[in-house]
C-alpha cells in the first residue's frame, strides 16, 4: 500500500492512495539539554522527543549544535527514534558528540550554544530548538 503525507498548520496528515482511510496526526517535537548550564569541558545530555506521530515509525533526527559566536564550534549528529504504537518516542545523545558525527563538538568556549533538532520521516516533518550555557 502506498500513502501520501503532508503537513498543514503543524499537523501531519497521511492518506492511503488506494483506499479512503486518512489519519491526521498532530506532531509535537522538542529538544532539551540537561543540565542547561555546564562548566567548560563538561558533558551534557541532549534529548529529542516526538509525540503524536506515526505509530511504530523510524524517524531520523539530526541534532545540530552551534557554539558561541567566534568559537568555530559547529557539529551535528544523526540518530533514529522508533515511535511506539501511540506515535511517541525519544532519543538521548551525550554532547560533546561521540563518533560518528560531522563537524566539531566541544564545550571549550564559554557562552550560549544553540541546538536544533530536525525530524525526518522521508521528508522533514518538524524542527525544535533550545540552548545551553557553558560558563
Image: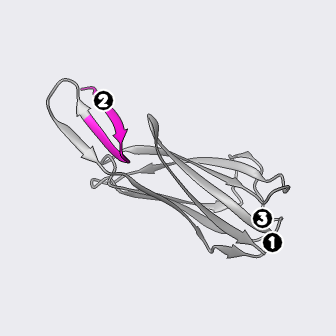
Q: Can you give x and y, in whole percent of width and height, for residue 110 in the image? A: 81, 69
Q: Nearer the viewer, residue 42 or 28?
A: 28
Mark 2 Cα-neighbour bin, 10 Å: few <14, some 14–19, many ≥20: few
- Give the mark nearer the N terminus: 2 vs 1: 2
Q: Nearer the viewer, residue 53 or 41?
A: 53
Q: Can you give x and y, in whole percent of width and height, for residue 127 in the image? A: 51, 49
Please indicate, yes or no, whether residue 43 appears anywhere in the rendered image.
Answer: no
Q: Which mark is residue 3?
A: none
Q: Which mark is residue 4?
A: 2
Which residues are drawn in magenta?
1-14
SS state under label 3: loop
Distance CA(mark 2)–CA(mark 3): 42 Å
- Residue drawn at x 66%, y 68% is 132
Q: Relative to residue 20, is residue 64 depicted above or below?
A: below
Q: Which mark is residue 107?
A: 3
- Residue drawn at x 78%, y 68% is 111
Q: Nearer the viewer, residue 76 or 24?
A: 24
- Residue drawn at x 71%, y 60% is 96
SS state under label 1: loop
- Give the mark nearer the N terminus: 2 vs 3: 2
Residue 53 belongs to the span the image colors magenta: no
Q: Nearer the viewer's eye, disc 2 or disc 1?
A: 2
Please say if the residues under marks 1 and 3 sit with CB atoms less than 8 Å apart: yes
- Give the mark nearer the N terminus: 1 vs 3: 1
Q: How many marks?
A: 3
Q: Can you give x and y, in whole percent of width and height, for residue 82 in the image? A: 41, 50
Q: Nearer the viewer's eye, disc 2 or disc 3?
A: 2
Q: Which mark is residue 40?
A: 1
Amino acid at each position: 500500500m502506498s500513502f501520501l503525507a503532508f503537513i498543514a498548520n503543524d499537523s501531519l496528515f497521511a492518506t492511503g492512495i488506494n483506499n479512503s482511510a486518512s489519519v491526521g496526526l498532530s506532531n509535537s517535537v522538542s529538544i532539551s539539554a540537561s543540565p542547561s548550564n555546564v562548566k567548560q569541558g563538561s558533558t551534557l545530555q541532549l534529548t529529542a522527543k516526538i509525540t503524536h506521530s506515526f505509530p511504530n515509525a523510524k524517524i531520523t533526527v539530526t541534532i545540530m549544535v552551534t557554539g558561541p559566536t567566534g568559537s568555530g564550534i559547529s557539529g551535528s549528529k544523526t540518530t533514529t527514534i522508533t515511535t511506539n504504537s501511540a506515535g511517541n518516542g525519544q532519543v538521548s545523545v551525550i554532547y560533546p558528540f561521540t563518533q560518528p558525527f560531522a563537524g566539531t563538538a566541544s564545550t571549550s568556549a564559554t557562552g550560549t550554544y544553540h541546538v536544533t533538532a530536525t525530524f525526518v520521516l522521508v521528508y522533514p516533518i518538524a524542527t525544535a530548538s533550545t540552548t545551553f550555557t557553558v560558563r
